[in-house]
Amino acid sequence: MSAIGIIEPKDILLEPPEGGWKLEKGGTLPEIRVRYEMVGTPEPDGGNVVFVCHALTGDAHVIGYRPGERPGTDRPSGWWEGMIGPLAGIDTDRFCVLCANILGGCSGTTGPASVNPETGKPYGSAFPEITMGDIVDVHRALIRQLGFRRIAAVVGGSFGGMQALEWAIRYPQDMRKCVLVASAASLNTQALAFDIVARHAIIQDPHWRHGDYYDGPHPVAGLANARRLAHITYLSQTSMDDKFGREKREEWLHQGKDFHTQVRRDFKTYFQIESYLEYQGQKFVRRFDANSYLHITRALDGYDPVETFGSLEAAVRHIQCKLLMVSLSGDWLFTREQAGRFVRACLNEGRDISYCHLHAPAGHDAFLTHIDELKLVMRAFLTATDASDPSTFNRAEAKAFESFARNIPEGARVLDIGCGDGTLLKQVALRRHAHGVGLERELPKVIEALHAGINVLMANVDTDLSHIPDHVFDVAIISHTIQVLNHPDRMMQQLLRVADWALIAFPNFGYLGMRLSLLFSGRMPRTREFPYEWYDTPNIHNCTLADFYDFCRRFGLRARLLNHRSASLVGRILCLLGMVNLGADGVILRLTKADEGDPRNGR
């Protein structure tokens, strides 16, 4: 049961510019009406408003019950139930949530089925072509007419994510944050092909009549087939196998001979998956308009910032807000590779980008149906503290990172590999005004870093560092991470490609205390730097300082010792005598290529 209750939709007639609403493809609309729903109380200037852009065939009813539904008896009908509400992904105790039906739709906002005030009849074939930019312009006109100037965030999934992206590019001052879920900057070729076939299914329906069908039968057969085709793309093969497999429709197997003869004549099957697709098609035609489907999918297919700006980098250069991109493992409609291209473009242009790749084998629709992890990610990002705000800084936790911070140049771009909860990056942001990005593979730590206001990329450092663009960072930091990697040699070879130089800290297994512990006890030692038992340690590549110097020589790297520490008086004396490999239990080094940087190679 939804905690939100019944949400009343609201209609508004937008105040038109002189000469009506001129669209990007040359058409004009004399008026535009928008239907929207709002949950929560907005601040006067909209500073707590989160605008949710709905997906391709969605509507403004994002949460709660529609009028006429019965709370406690009916299920809530909002399409993102669970994501929005008190203490949810978008917390209605903190934010006012606004969602509006898109231009060209059929759920209250002006579209092909709306009455043209100049003719008194539905627009039909006279409805002009629309673009993603037109849709966003209407969203923006709505928030302006409601009195909002700069809102907290714009959030969108799938087609809604493209709207959010276009909004961030087109009107960069409008929002502080932007979230793109299961989306991309443009459709891939396969997705385009599905849309093309779906539109053909509609226009080849004899009842379509070039869009002027409102006085007679509607092209429901074509629209149903378009929906069936689209629905295949929303599920993964795994989820379809799990749900249906090759199961037969039990009720059909017990029918008479005449029934089975008709099934064969109509080339139907007995498979459960056909029953499911038929149900989806018939349900869809009861709520959606074929002309709207044609116009919206064409706007979707045509969206491509690269075509407008010349490159994705040139497009994202306009963005000023903090960005979060989320991709899903089972989504083959908007792939991880597409998300990666967008993230790389943002890194190249120095945008504030965070990225999560979530395990969601159900497919594209998982952003609506399997949201447990997505809720945590979204909440952390939207409610994050300011990384450079001193009031949010835990100096006790950060003390261990002071030696790192003082070696970071003022205003540097910093990559923290294995950033954990982001404490180190918060320190360099506060003390050195550095622009930090963290790499972290564990989702709970990613969520902590997001909540700390850190730009963090969820990535497997062993494999994903190769996807970072060349030299987009001044400094890379590896703090107690190198020894937990499966392939530190591969990572180190990538390190000075993505950054000009690096700071590296690791526990020194050559420390005297470690040697003595192993010598006299015959057991794997446990120290401040190695507080684990042999069977639960994350450290899979233990090395000494001497080992690391040999490693650097082998791979054409130069390491200069910057700092060392010891837990014992004897260790500190050994370090003073120059025997750092014997006396230090932990070290920090500056790493450059062998033909660059400081020639000193301290031992």
Image (cartoon, grey):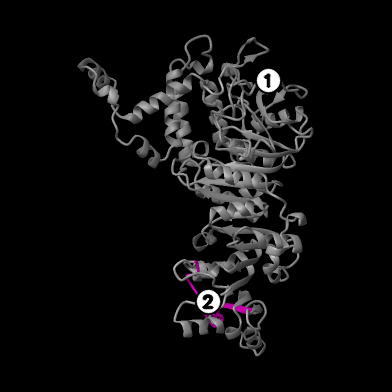
Residue 487 in sight? yes
Q: Quadrant of the C terminus?
A: bottom right
For this view, does 569 lie left or right of residue 358? Answer: right
Residue 602, which numbered label?
none
Q: Percent from the top left, x then y, of residue 328?
A: 50, 45
Q: Nearer the viewer, mark 2 or mark 1?
A: 1
Q: Quadrant of the N terminus?
A: top right
Residue 310 in sight? no
N-terminal of the pair, mark 2 or mark 1, is 1
Query: Circle 1 is placed at which residue position?
Result: 11
Relative to 33, is 88 above or below? Answer: below
Query: Residue 169 falls in which quadrant of the image?
Result: top right
Crowding near the residue tagged with mark 2, few <14, some 14–19, many ≥20 C-alpha atoms within 10 Å = few
Query: Circle 2 is placed at which residue position?
Result: 555
User: Identity of the amino acid at label 1?
Assistant: Asp
User: Identity of the amino acid at label 2?
Assistant: Phe
Residue sitting farthest toward the left: 257
Asked if the magenta segment contains residue 541, the reply would be yes
Q: Tell me what residue is drawn at x 34 percent, y 34 percent.
A: 244
Asked if the magenta segment contains residue 102, the reply would be no
Q: Percent from the top left, x then y, of residue 496?
A: 59, 69
Task: Find the magenta span and give its range.
Answer: 538-560
